[in-house]
Amino acid sequence: MSKRGDRPMVPRAEFKSYYGRPIVRPAPWTHDIASYLFTGGLAAGSALLAAGGQLTRRPRLRRAGRVASLGAVAASGYFLVADLGRPARFHHMLRVAKPTSPMSMGTWIFSAFSAAAGAAAITEAAPLLPPGFFRRVLPPVGAAAGLGAAVVAPALATYTAVLLADTATPSWHAAYPELPFVFAGSALASGAGVGLIADPAPPVRRMAVLGAALELYGAHRIETTKGILSEPFTSGHAGTLLRAGRLLTAAGIAGALLGRRSRVVSALSGLSLLAASAITRFGIFEGGMVSARDPKYTVIPQRERLAQRNE
């Protein structure tokens, strides 16, 4: 007589949370933080663009990158303070430096970058000054500050990815290996977008292709390799945003490569890349918030991990 496993006598239990409430508390962030993710990436990408223009002696790229970086980092400061509630809270975060805290390190990274980017942008006004000491001194100061901002830019572009992944939000936490690729690529693509509008030189097009490749690779991995935790990024409002971001990124790259002789096409490609970067950040933000609000994205992965350990 062959042996057979025991058959369950009752249906498999379905999980339920207390009154349907989330098991994981959603991050207490508003869309100000999603805007901060975009403007921070744009500031970092623009600083890298400006440094490239400086090193390759392309003054229009340098100037556009520095001005865009200052504008974006100023907007980032506004969105961050708007989320915190009052400016004093940002000041209080600078009282300590905690290497194990992405938020603490991010505050210092943001502050260092802001100082360097601001100094670099201000020196662009040197030609407007009368001949004299300041007109001679400002350009070298701007060159040093611009390179300093470019050194800090990769950290500014990616620390927010670490910050999201360090939370208990299920889909953000699961995507910790890929989020830095998405955010770094998005920052490069947005910086290249500024360059395509200002001066569509060959290095800008290469920057756009590299940024788009990193962003699309990371987003594809997030949407296809996380099991049920990929679902918030492929369905609903977040899925719509991320698909739109991919289309705009593809359109921007196509225009950048095929419209080399047309400033109009290059400018439209730059706008497309900027819009794609913003929409992608909002899609990532929305997908994570959805995964925190629905209990199944907490319970099902936990059961799957438990089943794997018991095999």
Image (cartoon, helix red, strand yellow):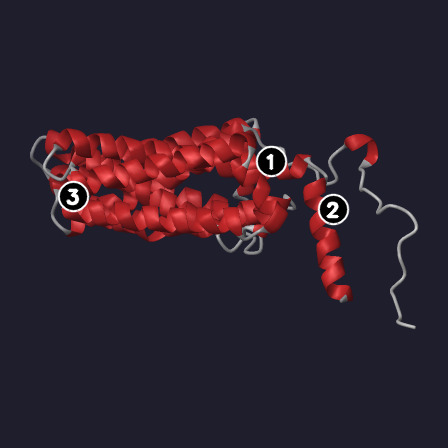
Task: For marks 1 and 2, give the one nearer the viewer.
Answer: 2
For marks 1 and 2 on the same chain, the one whose residue lies earlier in the sequence: 1
Q: What residue is at 21 percent from the left and 40 percent from the top?
A: 256
Q: Which mark is residue 289?
A: 1
Disc 2 secondary structure class: helix
In terms of depth relative to the viewer, which is nearer, 293 or 75? 293
Marks 2 and 3 sit apart, C-alpha to C-alpha, by 58 Å
- Image quadrant where residue 88 sits: top right
In terms of depth relative to the viewer, which is nearer, 7 or 2? 2
Left or right relative to 184: residue 54:
left
In terms of depth relative to the viewer, which is nearer, 73 or 92? 73
Q: 10 Å neighbourhood of mark 1: few (<14), some, or many (≥20)?
A: many
Q: Does 79 sit above or below residue 41?
A: above
Marks 1 and 2 sit apart, C-alpha to C-alpha, by 16 Å
Q: Does 6 sit above or below residue 150?
A: below
For marks 1 and 3 on the same chain, the one whose residue lies earlier in the sequence: 3
Label 3 sits on residue: 139
For marks 2 and 3 on the same chain, the one whose residue lies earlier in the sequence: 3
Task: For marks 1 and 3, give the one nearer the viewer.
Answer: 1
